[in-house]
Image: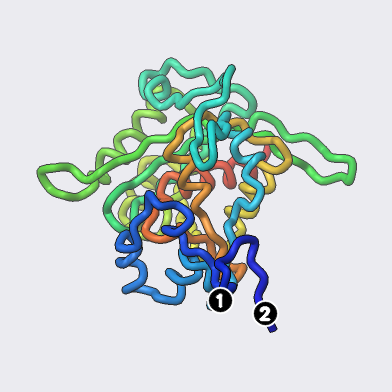
C-alpha cells in the first residue's frame, strides 16, 4: 500500500523540513534526533512512526483571539485596530481596572528546563447559557510575564515571582486561585497558602483537559487576548501526541503557552 503526500519527490519520498524551507539547516534538528529519532523523523521528515498532530490544526480562531494575522506564510503580525495589550505593568502599579467577575486566576509555569518561567493572568468576564443549556464562559487574558535566569546565579528567582503575586494582592486585586505546575512547586504552594492565597498544583502532562478547554473557548470566539508574537508561536508549535499529551515541537518552549492556558482554564471554572 502506497502512502499519499500533499507534496513529494518524484520517487514518492516526502520532503523534509529543510528541503521545503532552505533557511533551516538539518543540523539544527540534531539535538532532538539524538534524544528521540522517531519523533524527529515524524516532525521534520514527514515519516511518522506514531500518532501526532498539530494541536491547533485550524489556527484562524487562535490568531483572532490574540489579535494577530499572517503577514505572509509563517510570519505573524499584530492585527490592525488591536484593542488589548499586556497589562502586566499596570497591574503591578495598581492602575488596571478589572471588569466582569473581578477575580484574577493566575497560573505559574516554573520552567522544567530552567530557561524560562512564566506567569499568566486571566479572568472571567461573563458566563452565558447556550441554546443547549450549557454554560459558556467569556474570558479575558489580562497579562503575561516571563522570568529568566539571573546572571549572578544562573537560576530563575522564584522569590521574585512570589513577590509579584503578593504585590498584585496588595494592590487590591482579588485572586480566586493561583495554580502551579508540579515542578519544584511544593514550597512555592505552601508559602502562598500560608499568606492567604488559594494555591493548587496542576499537571499538564497527565491529560489534555486544560488545553482542550482552552481551545474550545478559543474556537467559540469567547477568549479576548492580546498580541504577543512569541506567545503565539508557542501555541502554533504545540502538538498532541498519541491523543493524550500536549508537547512543544522539537526544543521549542511552551512555558508562556502553559501559563496562559492554565490561567484561562481555571478562570472558566470560577463560579460567577
* 89 and 198: which is toward the camera: 89
Location of the N terminus by quadrant is bottom right
Label 1 neighbour load within 10 Å: few <14, some 14-19, many 20+: few
Whether residue 206 is visible: no
User: Of the numbered discs in the image, which one, if any, rests on residue 84?
Assistant: none
Give residue 143's position: percent from left, percent from top: 46, 31
Which element type, helix, strand or loop, lies under badge 1? Answer: loop
Q: Which residue is painted at 26% across and 43% down in the image?
A: 148
Mark 2 to mark 1 CA distance (whole Å): 17 Å
Q: Which residue is mark 2?
A: 2
Return the disc, 2 or 1, that comes first in the chain's sequence. 2
Q: Which residue is painted at 41% across and 27% down in the image?
A: 88
Which element type, helix, strand or loop, lies under badge 2? Answer: loop
* 55 and 264: which is toward the camera: 55
Give the vertical position of 252 relative to 206 (above or below).
Answer: above
Give the vertical position of 112 relative to 70 (above or below).
Answer: below
Judge from the rendering whether residue 249 lies leftward or rightward of residue 51; answer left or right: left
Q: Residue farthest to the left?
A: 152
Q: Which residue is mark 1?
A: 50
Label 2 neighbour load within 10 Å: few <14, some 14-19, many 20+: few
Q: Which residue is painted at 50% across and 59% down in the image?
A: 204
Display colour scheme: rainbow
Q: Residue farthest to the front?
A: 10
Give residue 124's position: percent from left, percent from top: 63, 34
Q: Would you say the residues marked 2 and 1 are in contact, meaning their CB atoms lie under 8 Å apart?
A: no
Give the vertical position of 38 relative to 44 (above or below).
Answer: below
Amino acid at each position: 500500500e502506497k502512502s499519499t503526500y500533499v507534496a513529494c519527490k518524484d520517487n514518492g519520498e516526502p520532503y523534509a523540513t529543510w528541503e521545503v524551507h532552505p533557511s533551516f539547516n538539518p543540523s539544527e534538528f540534531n539535538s532532538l534526533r539524538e534524544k528521540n529519532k522517531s519523533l524527529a523523523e515524524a516532525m521534520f521528515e514527514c515519516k511518522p512512526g506514531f500518532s501526532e498532530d498539530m494541536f491547533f490544526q485550524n489556527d484562524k480562531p487562535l490568531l483572532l483571539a490574540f489579535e494577530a494575522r499572517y503577514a505572509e506564510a509563517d510570519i505573524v503580525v499584530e492585527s490592525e485596530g488591536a484593542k488589548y495589550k499586556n497589562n502586566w505593568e499596570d497591574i503591578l502599579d495598581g492602575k488596571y481596572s478589572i471588569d466582569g467577575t473581578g477575580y484574577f486566576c493566575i497560573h505559574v509555569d516554573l520552567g522544567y528546563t530552567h530557561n524560562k518561567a512564566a506567569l499568566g493572568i486571566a479572568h472571567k468576564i461573563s458566563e452565558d447559557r447556550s441554546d443547549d443549556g450549557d454554560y459558556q464562559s467569556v474570558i479575558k487574558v489580562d497579562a503575561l510575564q516571563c522570568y529568566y535566569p539571573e546572571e549572578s546565579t544562573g537560576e530563575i528567582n522564584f522569590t521574585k515571582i512570589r513577590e509579584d503575586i503578593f504585590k498584585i494582592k496588595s494592590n487590591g486585586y482579588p485572586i480566586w486561585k493561583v495554580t502551579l505546575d508540579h515542578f519544584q512547586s511544593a514550597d512555592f504552594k505552601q508559602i502562598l497558602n500560608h499568606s492567604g492565597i488559594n494555591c493548587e498544583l496542576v499537571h499538564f502532562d497527565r491529560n489534555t483537559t486544560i488545553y482542550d478547554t482552552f481551545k474550545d473557548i478559543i474556537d467559540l470566539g469567547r477568549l479576548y487576548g492580546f498580541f504577543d508574537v512569541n506567545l503565539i508561536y508557542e501555541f502554533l508549535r504545540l502538538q498532541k501526541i498519541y491523543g493524550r499529551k500536549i508537547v512543544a515541537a522539537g526544543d521549542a518552549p511552551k512555558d508562556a503557552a502553559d501559563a496562559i492556558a492554565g490561567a484561562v482554564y481555571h478562570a472558566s471554572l470560577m463560579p460567577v
